[in-house]
Amino acid sequence: MVRTPLTPEERERGERLGQLLRAARGDRSMTEVAAEAGISAETLRKIETGRAPTPAFFTVAALARALGLSMDELVVRCLLVPV
């Protein structure tokens, strides 16, 4: 199965998600947050850097829980277009 290429908007949304998660992580290590979320540090690194712009829903939900963010907040902040 061939994946459809992502649109520029989808890539930008993934970058915003990564930036938001990185900011929420603060001084906590990537390894600590990834372990708490039940994912690999490499997966978190890819999400934070935008190299994985469309992570699975349950991955995002687990990260939100580990970082104390609500899914509603993530959705709203990721859909906002920077001015």
Image: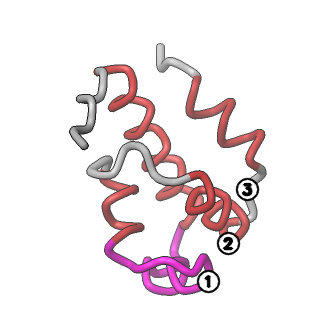
Badge 1 crowding class, 10 Å Cα cut-off, few under 14, some 14 to 19, many 20 or more, is some
Q: CA distance from mark 3 to mark 2?
A: 8 Å
Question: What type is the residue that disc 3 sits on?
Answer: Leu
From the viewer's perspective, is residue 11 above or below residue 37?
above
Q: Secondary structure at mark 3?
A: loop
Type of the residue with mark 2: Ala
Asked if 72 appears above or below 39 in the picture, the reply is above
The stretch in magenta equals: 26-42
The residue at which mark 1 appears reads as: 36
Q: In the rendered image of this protein, does residue 15 appear above or below residue 65?
A: above
Q: Which residue is mark 3?
A: 69
Q: CA distance from mark 3 to mark 1?
A: 14 Å
Measured as percent of width and height from the top left, residue 10 is found at 39, 27
Q: Residue at x 54, y 86 (%)?
A: 35
Residue at which label 2 appears: 66
- Check residue 7 in the rendering and tell me which mark sits there, or answer none: none
How many numbered discs, if any? 3
Q: Tell me the distance, in whole angstroms, between the alpha carbons under discs 1 and 2.
A: 6 Å
Disc on the earlier residue, 3 or 1? 1
Q: Position of residue 69 (x, y in %)?
A: 73, 56
Q: Point out the image quarter for the N terminus.
A: top left
Mark 2 element type: helix
Label 3 Cα crowd, 10 Å radius (few <14 / some 14-19 / many 20+): some
Q: Residue furthest front?
A: 1
